[in-house]
Image (spheres, helix red, strand yellow):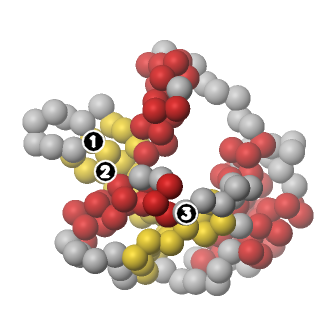
């Protein structure tokens, strides 16, 4: 079985929702925060990779399946709040938890710059790095994939 930080977090928050979504396969409704987060992530990724701001926003709105509550102006505002940085984007990892269980952990690091990795958040309530285990999981993945003993983690709220 493959787990991600979001799957584990959902299980921790509400085991019944986890069961409905991942065991029974019932889709959850796409809320505005979910669609907006997806759009902003995509816009930041595309802009970092050289796409113009306008094209990045349009592609991001498509990525969010034209959610009726996600507007060009809102994505633009959040995109402009993101730092202007360069690096490798959307770094996928899939690592075995151990050698015998078959359990794997996967995720996507939003931006990787040498030993720095970044995670974009479009939450309205900022929190500290140590309030979540997501970046600790990403640090472990970075260590396993890059064999780097040091890393610096950044959460960016837009």
Identified at 42% across, 37% down, the residue is 8
Q: CA distance from mark 1 to mark 3?
A: 27 Å
Dot 1 and dot 3 residues touching (CB under 8 Å)? no
Mark closer to the chain start, 1 or 2: 2
Q: CA distance from mark 3 to mark 2?
A: 25 Å
Name the quarter where the C terminus is drawn: bottom right
Question: Is residue 42 something one can see in this rendering?
Answer: no
The residue where tag 3 is placed is: 128
Taking depth in this image into account, of 4 and 127 the one nearest to the observer is 127
Q: Residue furthest top?
A: 24
Which numbered tag is attached to residue 146? none
Identified at 46% across, 30% down, the residue is 11
Q: How busy is the neighbourhood of tag 2: few (under 14 within 10 Å), some, or many (20 plus)? A: some
Q: Quadrant of residue 84?
A: bottom right
Q: Could you tell me which secondary element the residue under label 3 belongs to?
A: loop
Dot 1 and dot 2 residues touching (CB under 8 Å)? yes
Identified at 50% across, 63% down, the residue is 129
Identified at 55% across, 67% down, the residue is 155
Placement of 24 over or under 59, stated as above or below? above
Tally of numbered tags: 3
Q: Could you tell me which secondary element the residue under label 2 belongs to?
A: strand
Q: How busy is the neighbourhood of tag 1: few (under 14 within 10 Å), some, or many (20 plus)? A: some
Q: CA distance from mark 1 to mark 2?
A: 6 Å
Which numbered tag is attached to residue 104? 1
Q: Quadrant of residue 105?
A: top left
Rendering coords of residue 88 (x, y %): 46, 75
Placement of 52 over or under 133, stated as above or below? below
Describe residue 26's horizontal placement relative to residue 40 as left or right.
Answer: left
The residue where tag 2 is placed is: 94
Q: How busy is the neighbourhood of tag 3: few (under 14 within 10 Å), some, or many (20 plus)? A: few
């Amino acid at each position: 079985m493959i787990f991600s930080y979001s799957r584990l977090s959902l299980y921790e928050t509400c085991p019944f929702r986890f069961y409905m979504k991942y065991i029974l396969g019932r889709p959850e409704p796409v809320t505005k925060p979910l669609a907006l987060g997806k759009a902003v992530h995509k816009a930041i990724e595309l802009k970092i990779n050289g796409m113009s701001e306008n094209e990045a926003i349009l592609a991001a709105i498509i990525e969010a399946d034209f959610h009726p509550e996600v507007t060009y102006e809102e994505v633009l505002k959040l995109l402009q709040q993101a730092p202007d940085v360069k690096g490798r984007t959307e770094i996928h990892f899939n690592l075995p938890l151990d050698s015998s269980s078959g359990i794997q952990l996967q995720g996507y690091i939003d931006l990787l710059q040498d030993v720095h990795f970044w995670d974009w958040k479009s939450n309205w309530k900022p929190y500290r790095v140590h309030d979540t285990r997501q970046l600790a999981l990403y640090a472990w993945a970075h260590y396993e994939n890059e064999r780097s003993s040091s890393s610096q983690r950044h959460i960016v709220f837009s």
